[in-house]
Image (cartoon, rainbow, N blue to C red):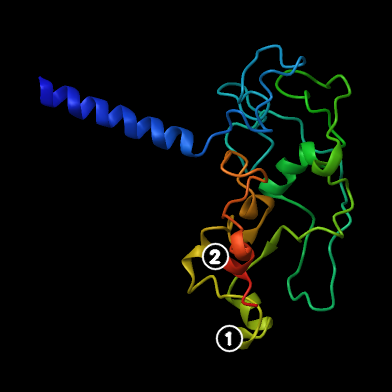
Amino acid sequence: MKTKNIFLTLALALSTTFAFAQSIVGSKHDMSALTWNAEGEICITCHTPHNSQAASVGAPLWNHAATATATFGLYASGTLDANVGQPAGTSKLCLSCHDGTVDLEAYGATASGAGTKMTGVAMLGTNLATHHPVSFTYDTALYTADGGATGGLFDPASKAEVADLLFGGSVECASCHDAHDTSNTKFLAVDNAASALCLTCHNK
């Protein structure tokens, strides 16, 4: 019996450790205490177990109104070999709050919110020309076009850390930012000390 209790205690300790290692609780994405969140729930502003917005793709059981922006301004550079398209998938879901066109409280059965929109540095707007490009394919073809071994990118086919950051083979907002990770203030998917996140994909 004593041995069983020791194992049970250890299991609970481990589960608690992993449960809070990456969590939305207490982060800027935890909107449970805001006045417009009548339910007081943490997850409901983005996800729901029932009656989700099936038309939205890229996230499980999505519950927030989509961005109203049809055409975003896109990043462009003479050194960019990628074909950057309009934000799609998970990036478009992130922009449903971060482009500032949709009320934060426009979720679930609520057709529209009360006018509470994203502000400050978190509000990217609809012109993404000054932000890292998203929604482009990052594969061996791009690696080759960028100069291969002497270029500026790693080949995702031979570097698992790169492939792990991609969504269906594409770079998206969530490639760099993990919306559920409170281990750093910018929700970075990889700690960027000494530019570690940047250097996961970039070879210089």
- What is the three-letter code of the residue carrying label 2? Val
- Residue 166 percent location from the top left of the image: 58, 58
User: Where is the C terminus found, in terms of image quarters?
Assistant: bottom right
- What is the three-letter code of the residue carrying label 1? Ala
- Residue 192 percent location from the top left of the image: 61, 58
Q: Is residue 97 left or right of residue 42?
A: right
- Residue 50 percent location from the top left of the image: 58, 21
Query: Is 184 or 67 nearer to us in this picture?
Result: 184
Residue at x-position 88% and y-position 48%: 126
Badge 1, how many Cα within 10 Å: few under 14, some, many 20+? few
Q: What label sits on residue 24 in the rendered view?
A: none
Q: Is residue 9 left or right of residue 106?
A: left
Residue at x-position 89% and y-position 56%: 73
Q: Is residue 27 left or right of residue 109?
A: left
Query: Which is more N-terminal, label 1 or label 2?
Result: 1
Badge 2, how many Cα within 10 Å: few under 14, some, many 20+? many
Determine contact: label 2, label 1, CB under 8 Å: no
The image quadrant of residue 149 is: bottom right
Q: What label sits on residue 149 in the rendered view?
A: 1
- Residue 135 percent location from the top left of the image: 71, 58
Q: Secondary structure at mark 2?
A: helix
Whether residue 200 is situated above or below residue 86 in the rendered picture? below
Determine which residue is flagged by label 2.
162
Q: Secondary structure at mark 1?
A: helix
